Image (tube, rainbow, N blue to C red):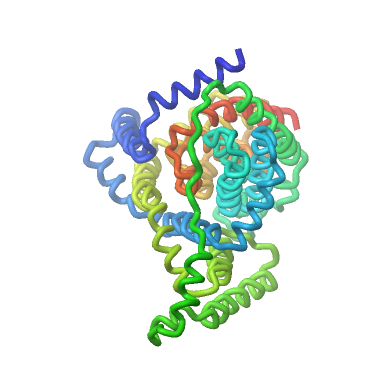
């Protein structure tokens, strides 16, 4: 039976789930039709909403593209390849590889979601090389499953937003400290259960999968030969080539970057936002490659992996524009509020956030859409506003397991398509509903 469930979802996704870009196109058309049908918006208005929002995620798209590019660059450096190889050697069997990758990815995502996506994908690549018998698709799905925990961790955008003094709902609920959200007993329970159970669920998926096909991990370049060629040709280099192969320039540039990183943490404490993570990975990559030429050679290869992100994110921004401007997202949230009681309100908030996440796959953006509806409703029902906020946060994280938006950076590093992992992620989605729902209802 268990094997049949795994095979069913894997084959279903392999057969019917289109490429991630086509998934974004289909969502665009669905939201366009829903907006006309349920909000009274005209086709012309929906087109204007779509086009008006199309470029709203440019900054975020650049951030995510840099996650892929800088992660690839750092991964290709000899020192990181050596470290990840040693870490991957902790696993000597397919089962151990699954457990290792899931746990490390989950811990990394609790620290920072961007950091976790890169670390999980890179570790999975190296673990697959150490244990060739493991199913690479399931291993990468295990790496992505750790992303389920991000919104309950230190980089959760919703709990961090409401912890600031001047957030947009501060007049209504004030600032809510992270001790009431991230470090609440409810959230710690959910995080602990998922942290323990996800590796075991992924191990069960691996054992119950009857597909013996394997996808080979992408090749990372070896630079020893390049360095030997540079050393042998050093005497005949032009001045420009000497600059390109100068270690001093890399040390100076990397040292400047490290100085800012130290300054940042001294001034801001443990502030691991996506920009500082990209900054750290970028300048570590510059140092790890030793010369500008070796660094630039890897940049050329790395940018090839970011194409899907660059093209698809504007379409998701257009979807968000239609959802918000037409009022469709507001109608969805209000419908769940109307069917809720004081007991079921956190659960229905969570479910509504999970559905809305398909169309507004950004934690901060989703909070801006749902908070003005859910927070007043929670106050009317006498519900804890901190729990309401975390219900939205967990709903946003929950359906990421079957929404390709956040998987794009990982898939680019992995060299896989969305259909390769989503069948396994459906099982993660189903299982994770139960501990999250229990925590929201009873803790």
Q: Which residue lies furthest to the front in this view?
A: 232
The percent coordinates of residue 129 (x first, y second) are 58, 44
Q: Which residue lies furthest to the right in this view?
A: 185
Q: Which residue lies furthest to the top in this view?
A: 1
Q: Is residue 353 toward the left or the right of residue 108 in the image?
A: left
Q: Is residue 105 toward the left or the right of residue 33 in the image?
A: right
Q: Is residue 277 above or below residue 405?
A: below
Residue 278 occupies quadrant? bottom right
User: What residue lies at 35% left-to-right and 40% top-to-bottom?
Assistant: 21
Q: Considering depth in this image, is 92 or 66 the residue closer to the camera?
A: 92
Residue 243 occupies quadrant? bottom left
Residue 45 in sight: yes
Q: Is residue 183 toward the left or the right of residue 135 in the image?
A: right
Q: Considering depth in this image, is 360 or 374 the residue closer to the camera?
A: 360
The percent coordinates of residue 134 (x first, y second) are 59, 34
Q: How many marks?
A: 0
Q: Considering depth in this image, is 435 or 21 the residue closer to the camera?
A: 21
Q: Residue furthest left?
A: 44
Q: In this view, does 15 lie above or below 75?
A: above
Quadrant that contains the N terminus: top right
User: What residue lies at 38% left-to-right and 85% top-to-bottom?
Assistant: 238
The percent coordinates of residue 324 (x first, y second) are 40, 43
Quadrant that contains the C terminus: top right
Q: Is residue 68 above or below residue 261?
A: above
Q: Considering depth in this image, is 107 or 413 the residue closer to the camera?
A: 413
The percent coordinates of residue 354 (x first, y second) are 53, 34
User: What residue lies at 56% left-to-right and 17% top-to-bottom?
Assistant: 5
Residue 53 in sight: no
């Amino acid at each position: 039976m268990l094997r049949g469930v795994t095979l069913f979802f894997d084959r279903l996704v392999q057969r019917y789930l289109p490429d991630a870009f086509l998934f974004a196109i289909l969502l665009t058309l669905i939201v366009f039709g829903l907006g006309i049908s349920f909000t009274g918006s005209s086709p012309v208005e929906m087109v204007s909403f779509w086009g008006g929002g199309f470029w709203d995620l440019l900054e975020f798209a650049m951030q995510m593209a840099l996650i892929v590019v800088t992660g690839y660059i750092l991964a290709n450096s000899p020192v990181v390849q050596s470290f990840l190889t040693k870490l991957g050697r902790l696993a000597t069997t397919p089962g151990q590889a699954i457990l290792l990758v899931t746990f490390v990815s989950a811990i990394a995502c609790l620290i920072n979601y961007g950091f976790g996506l890169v670390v999980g994908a890179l570790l999975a690549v190296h673990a697959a090389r150490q244990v060739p018998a493991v199913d690479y698709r399931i291993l990468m799905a295990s790496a992505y499953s750790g992303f389920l925990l991000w919104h309950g961790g230190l980089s959760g955008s919703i709990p961090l937003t409401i912890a600031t003094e001047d957030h947009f709902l501060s007049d209504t609920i004030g600032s809510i400290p992270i001790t009431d959200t991230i470090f609440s007993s409810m959230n710690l329970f959910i995080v602990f259960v998922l942290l323990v159970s996800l590796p075991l669920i992924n191990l069960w998926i691996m054992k119950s999968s009857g597909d013996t096909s394997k996808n080979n991990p992408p090749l990372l370049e070896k630079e020893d030969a390049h360095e030997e060629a540079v050393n042998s040709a050093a005497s005949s280099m032009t001045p420009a080539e000497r600059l390109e192969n100068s270690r001093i320039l890399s040390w100076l540039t990397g040292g400047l970057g490290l100085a800012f990183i130290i300054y940042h943490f001294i001034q801001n404490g443990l502030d691991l936002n996506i920009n500082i993570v990209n900054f750290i990975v970028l300048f570590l990559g510059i140092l790890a490659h030793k010369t500008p030429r070796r660094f630039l050679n890897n940049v050329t290869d790395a940018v090839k992996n970011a194409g899907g992100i660059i093209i698809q994110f504007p379409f998701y921004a257009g979807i968000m524009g239609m959802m918000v401007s037409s009022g469709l997202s507001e109608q969805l949230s209000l419908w769940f509020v109307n069917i809720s009681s004081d007991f079921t309100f956190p659960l229905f908030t969570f479910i509504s956030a999970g559905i809305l996440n398909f169309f507004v796959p950004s934690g901060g953006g989703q909070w801006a859409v749902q908070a003005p509806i859910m927070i007043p409703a929670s106050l009317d029902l006498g519900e804890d506003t901190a729990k309401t906020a975390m219900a939205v946060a967990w709903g946003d994280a929950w359906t990421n397991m079957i929404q390709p938006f956040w998987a794009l950076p990982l898939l680019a590093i992995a060299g896989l398509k969305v259909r390769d992992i989503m069948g396994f992620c459906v099982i993660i989605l189903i299982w994770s509903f139960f501990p999250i729902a229990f925590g929201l209802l009873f803790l």
